[in-house]
Structures are given as structure tokens and as C-alpha cells.
Amino acid sequence: MSATLDATHSIRPRYIPGYAIRDDVSAESRRKGFADVEGWGNVSVLQNAGTTLKVERGKTIFRDGDLAEFSYRVIGGAVRLCKLFPDGRRQIVDFCLPGDFFGFGSPDEYALTAEAVSDATVIRYSRKHIEHLGRVSPDFRDHLMALLHRGLSSAQNHLFMLGRQTVKERVTSFLLMMLDRQGRAGENGDRLDLPMGRQDIADYLGLTIETVCRALSDLKRNGAIKAPGTREIVVTNATLLRATAEGDA
Amino acid sequence: MSATLDATHSIRPRYIPGYAIRDDVSAESRRKGFADVEGWGNVSVLQNAGTTLKVERGKTIFRDGDLAEFSYRVIGGAVRLCKLFPDGRRQIVDFCLPGDFFGFGSPDEYALTAEAVSDATVIRYSRKHIEHLGRVSPDFRDHLMALLHRGLSSAQNHLFMLGRQTVKERVTSFLLMMLDRQGRAGENGDRLDLPMGRQDIADYLGLTIETVCRALSDLKRNGAIKAPGTREIVVTNATLLRATAEGDA
DNA sequence: CGTCCTATTGACTGTATTCAAGATACGTGG
DNA sequence: CCACGTATCTTGAATACAGTCAATAGGACG
């Protein structure tokens, strides 16, 4: 196995908002049904370099303002990155799914708080080590840059969502984005597992929990989706779903 | 003059939303009253490397989807980076002021459209050249990374604004942010020149132009600001202004 | 089986948008 | 330099949409 990864893999055009520094190599492997996550984990320089941690649902991994000693990668479960305010307001900036990296955001201190959405397993890497690798390996560096670029681009989609999309569009785009991140094309019959609750979705989309519920109920009512469980969504009318996300419905 | 720049300069905690890849060295020099912009422009490896261009107000510099051949730096005037949609919706992602870099966002194609807000002067650098410098100079690389990090962090503030702040808070935060970017602390008597019109502010804040006007009128009415001209703001009650931005008013 | 937590639905309220009318500023040409 | 025409900005009134408050329903877990 080579010590490098191709950093020029294609960027998918839609439904990839958020800041988690994602690794499309691993997304690709998920899409193709590989059980294990690939990507940096397979970069020889990083192999065995990290510590595996279990994080309980709801627990904080690091806080906005903490000294940024470590970077992380999600192995199992899900993590949310958010801005918390003294008065309780919360904006979720991204969800990190298996394969995603986080904690690269700021040179000194974390700019975000990271919490486990569900029970999660993460690998923790020393940032000193990561920085060293960056100095030593041009390919590793390129990869890092590409991931940062990806993060910026995702953020821009998210901004558009919050600033200019209606509630229906936001919620539908969110579902399509999550489908995409789980390697589903978003066709009829595709099933989506939501690792997060309604409040988390609301805080990601800049809405209240009630508004999210109502939007989902509307989608159920008009036959775009079914919801066998509160965290399971099945696409029943992909065309309608996409039209709704684009505002043509 | 050294070929490097200190990439570990402090990051200011507030009012720096947006994605323009800003150079705090130059921001610092503006703040201290230096007439000319410093930063990368003074990095010997970049000196004389770019082409100076004049861009008329309203003209497009590059479009979302264009091949990303160049990176830019604003010398005079202002540039907006935005996402445009077929149905006319627009989300401004950042304003670039003198000293700011833009067009670093994506490896292949631009992910945003760049347009001149006012008549502007920019320097255009070949991305191939920039990439070469990145390969050759570790310090240049660090600087680039730091700027990308900055961009991410700014984006997060912007997301919070759009997702969780009220109209009053957004508009007031925007004014304080612009003051900050013009090197003003935001004290009574400080004057702010807005290079952009109301519609641009609205598209940055995810609002309508009418809502922005009303919020500004409210601030005038309660004595927080005065507006000698439509693009000039004078702070008349800094305490109230800050309280409003934080939601305590 | 009961408790707790999350999700859903309903009724009402409040805020930002929409539509529409005026006012101000700006650039152009006389 | 002024007059005009166009852009932009501001204000007003009515509407629509998402938020709030409150009650009910559903699930997970002991």
C-alpha cells in the first residue's frame, strides 16, 4: 500500500454541506459497500498513530476555546460540531459520520464544540504528529489542503441553505444530503438511517424542532417519503423529493 | 525583507464572518494607518508575480463552475463572493476588501461567483504559480493553511448569524464586523464606509432589502447610529450597538 | 408496566416578507 | 450648474410563514 492518497478525486456537486473534513475515498468505499472505512486510516504514515476512544452519546469531545491538541476521525456513530451560545442558542455546523475527520479547524484553539450524537468511536491523532506529517510528506499535505477546500465548499452550501432556502427545501435537501453521505443515490426505495434526533436536525437547519417535524409530516403526507421509525426514512417518490429540494414543488 | 510571514498572528475573536481569505497582517497595517496594503504582496516570492486588473462595478471576475486558473487579491474597491441560483436567489458568502485574497476555494473549478461591488482593482495570480510556491516554500504553505483555517472559522460565524440570530442582531453584527475590518474598534464617533448597497447586505444576511432598511432605521431611531449618507454609518452609542448584536437589547 | 424522553400535532402569536408607494441619491445631458 | 431620468433606498400596510406555547402520542428502557 502506498503512503499517499489521490487528492484529486472528484467532488460531488450536491448535497454535501457542512464542515466535517470528509474523505471521499472513504465515502466512495461506503458507497460500494465496503464494510471498513478507508482513507487516511490506510495511509501508512498514519496507521497505528492514533488512539481509539469510545464516546458516550451526548458527551463532549472538545469545547470551543479548548487548546487544540488533537484531531479526530470518526470510526463509528456520529459526532456533531456546533457553536454554542451562553443564552442556549446552538448552531450545528456539521455532522461527522464514519470516515470523517474533525478538529482541524483552527491552529490554536478549537473554534467549535464537538459532541457525540450517538455512542461513537473515534480515533484521536496528535496534532503535532499531523503537522509533522504535513511537513514531511507533500502528498499528505495535498490531501490535507484538499480536505480543507472541501470543507469551505460545503460551508458555502450550508450558508445558502440557511440564508435562502425555504423550510421545505432545507429539510428535503438535508435528507438528500444524508442519503448521499450514506452512499445512496436517493432513488425510490432507498432507506436512510438518521443518526441524529429532530432537535439536532433543527439546529443544523436553523429551525425549531416543531418546524422540522411539520416539514417531515408534509413530505409523508404528499407521498415523498415514509418513516417506518423516527430515525428511518424511506424514499417513496424520488422525483418529488428532488423537486421539493430545488423549490419546484 | 524576509520571504516569509508570521502565520501565527493572533486571530481576533469576533465579527470576522465570511470566507475571504484575509490577511491579518494587512488588516493590522490598515488598523495602524499604513496607507498601503501589506502581507503577501510583500512576500518576495510573490512580488511582481501578479497582473493588476481594473474591474468595473457589477462586472463578473469569475463564475461558479469556471476553470479555476487564477487566484486574486483585492487592492482597491470591494468584491463579493456569491452563490447564484437559476431562479435568481443569491447568497453572498463574503465581501473582499483591500488586502483580501479570493479564488483559493476549490482545486478545479471555482465554487463561487466573484463580482465587483464597486469599481475595483485586483491583482491576479496564476494558481499554478501559487501551487508551485506552496511546494517550494514551507512558510508560504503555512500561511496558506492559516488563511484557509481562517476562512473556515469565519464561515462558522456566518452560519450562526444566518441560522440563529435575529434580524437586529444580524444587521448590528454586520456593522460591527465591517467596522472591525476597517480597523475601527467600534467606539462612539467611529465612522464606517460601506462599499456595498443595501441589497448586497441583505443577500449577505439572508434577508430582504426592506428588512435591512427597517433594522437600520431602528438603530438610527434609538440612537445607536447615525447615517450621514446611505453608505456612511457613524457610531453614536457603542454600548447599545454591542448589546444589540449580542441580543441584550 | 410505568416512567422518561423525544416526537408530533394544534392553536395562536409575532416577525419577516411581499406588494406598493414615495423619497432620496446619482449620473447624464442640456 | 441645473434638470431630468433612473437607481436605490425608505416607509407603509397587508400577508404569510415560522416560532411559541401547550397538549398529546409514541418509543426506549428499566
Image (cartoon, coloured by chain):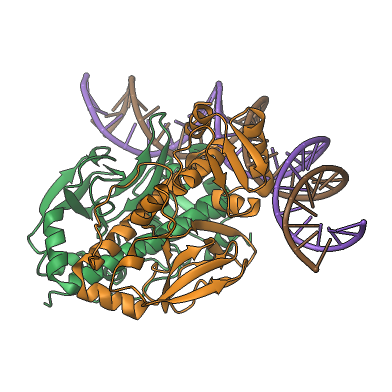
Chain colours: A orange, B green, C purple, D brown
Identify the residue at horizontal 21%, vertical 71% (top origin). Answer: A137
Identify the residue at horizontal 12%, vertical 77% (top origin). Answer: B2
Look at the image and tell me whether residue A214 can be seen.
yes
Report x, y in % for residue A175.
53, 42
In depth, the one of B53 and A159 nearer the eye is A159
In depth, the one of A146 and A83 nearer the eye is A146
In the image, is residue B109 above or below residue A21?
A: above
Identify the residue at horizontal 65%, vertical 40% (top origin). Answer: A227
Report x, y in % for residue A135.
22, 75
- Tell me: B42 left or right of B65: left
- Residue extending farthest to the left is B48
Report x, y in % for residue B77.
25, 50
The image quadrant that residue B241 belongs to is bottom right
In depth, the one of C6 and C1 nearer the eye is C1
Numbered-mark total:
0
User: If the image is split into quadrants, where does the N terminus of chain A sit?
Assistant: bottom left
In the image, is residue A221 above or below residue B18?
A: above
Report x, y in % for residue D9.
45, 39
